[in-house]
Image (cartoon, rainbow, N blue to C red):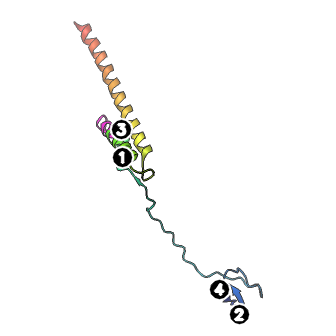
Amino acid sequence: MTMISCPACSHQVSDQATSCPNCGHPLVPAATTNVATYSNTSGTNTSVPAIVSLVFGLLSWCILPFIGAIVAVIAGHIARSEIRSAPAGTIDGDGMAIAGLILGWAHLVVVLLGLLFIFAVLGGFAAMSH
């Protein structure tokens, strides 16, 4: 804490005071530089295969059917293995890897059921035509 002079009465006042105790003149604190510093040095990183798994899991449902699901499942398993083998808390992204795995496997199940349905229906029609 330092002492400053009141601009109105020149009385010595603490730099923390909001007004002069002698004359009541409001004091404006000295401008301080409040620069927010952000750094990504927390010690944790997000697993790249986990991000890939989630992205391709989502893409498998709209743009890359089947191929996206295969990539999502493989990348999801790689990410989970990478996260489990790293020291605890150093790699994040387990939730993304699980979401990518669920989306990928669900898409593969839907594709498999669709193919079974198509073969059953077309096979049934083929058997009926003979």
Q: Residue furthest left?
A: 130
User: How crowded is the residue under tag 1: few (<14 C-alpha within 10 Å), some, or many (20+)?
Assistant: some
Q: Comparing marks 1 and 2, which lies closer to the viewer?
A: 1
Does any portion of residue 14 appear in the rendered image?
yes
Check disc 1 and report the residue beneath it.
82
Check disc 4 and give the amino acid type.
Thr
Check disc 1 and give the amino acid type.
Glu
Q: Looking at the image, which is closer to me, 73 or 67?
A: 73
In percent of width and height, residue 54 lies at 38, 43
Callout 1 touching callout 4 (CB < 8 Å): no
Q: Gap in Å between the C-alphas at discs 4 and 2?
A: 15 Å
Check disc 2 and report the residue beneath it.
10
Q: Does 1 sit left or right of 107 as displayed? A: right
Q: Who comes first in sequence, dot 2 or dot 3?
A: 2
Q: Gap in Å between the C-alphas at discs 1 and 3?
A: 28 Å
Q: Who comes first in sequence, dot 4 or dot 2?
A: 4
Check disc 3 and report the residue beneath it.
62
Which region is colored magenta?
60-73
Quadrant assignment for the N terminus: bottom right
Q: Comparing marks 1 and 3, which lies closer to the viewer?
A: 1
